[in-house]
Structures are given as structure tokens and as C-alpha cells.
Image: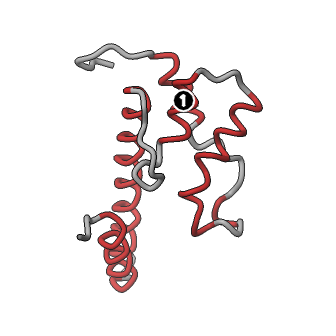
Amino acid sequence: MILPFRFKQKQLVRGALLHNYFLYDWHNVKLEKLHGFHHPRIACENAKRDFDLTPVEENIIKRHMFPLTPIPPRYKEAVLVTISDKICATREVFAALGRKIAHGRPTAYLAHMFAFLIAFLPWN
């Protein structure tokens, strides 16, 4: 990976691989609507139980949902994973919306677009 700064590659990869290590299907649990708020803590607890984590790896896992979770990442490796996670999530949302349009479900498309706008635009 070519970046204009140095980073801890092994810790970046381990943190990235473990950042969603919550070990449950979030679609089928009571926390479904609050999953985004709780899964970083749960993933970190699971990862700490199963692996020896460095502070950088722990920060990647705990802070990757910023700004949904209020404390920002501390390390540049955690910032990289946070930004990458947002890019992937955005692509997944728009891919799902495209499938809804292609299958003739414009109402579902509009509902998702409205939810996206409410969730991600800065409302003052």
C-alpha cells in the first residue's frame, strides 16, 4: 500500500480483520437497531478474549464506527480502517439501492435514500 506516511502494517491488518468480530448475526438479535453503537465494544471484547491485541489494534476495533460512537480514533491505522469502513458501507448501501430500483421497487429506494439523508447529512 502506497501512502504518504508510515504505518504499522501488521497491526493495521489485524485490526481491520477483527473490527467486526462480534460473532453474531446482527439481523437476528434484539440489538439490531442499536448494533452500530454496541458492536465495536462487543467485537473488542471477543478479540481480546481470543487474541493478544496491541493498543493500536484495540483502538482500531473500538473506534471504527466514529462518528456514530463519539470518541474518535487515536492512531492513523485506526483512521484508515474507519475511513475504509465508511467507503465500503456507502458502496454496499448504494448497491442495495440499485438492486431495489432494478427490481421495480422505487418506494423502497426512496425510503432508503430518505434514511440515508437523515443519518449522514449534517443537520444544524
Q: How many marks?
A: 1
Q: Amino acid at mark 1?
A: Gly
Q: Residue at x 76, y 32 (%)?
A: 49
Direction bottom: furthest residue: 107
Q: Residue at x 27, y 18 (%)?
A: 2
Image coordinates of residue 47 in percent, x first then y, are 69, 34
- 22 vs 56: above or below: below
Direction right: furthest residue: 49
Image coordinates of residue 46 in percent, x first then y, are 72, 39
Quadrant hosting residue 1: top left
Quadrant hosting residue 113: bottom left
Quadrant hosting residue 85: top left
Dot 1 alpha-carbon crowd within 10 angstroms: few under 14, some 14 to 19, many 20 or more: many
Q: Residue at x 52, y 20 (%)?
A: 11
The front one of 93 and 124 is 124
- 31 vs 25: above or below: below
- 35 vs 84: above or below: below
Q: How is the image coloured?
A: secondary structure
* Residue that carries the numbered disc 1 in the rendered image: 15
Quadrant containing the C terminus in the rendered view: bottom left
Q: Residue at x 55, y 37 (%)?
A: 61
Image coordinates of residue 78 in percent, x first then y, are 43, 32
Image coordinates of residue 118 in percent, x first then y, are 33, 73
Q: Describe residue 26's horizontal placement relative to residue 109 as left or right.
A: right
What is the secondary structure assignment of the residue under circle 1?
helix
Q: Describe residue 38's horizontal placement relative to residue 8 as left or right.
A: right
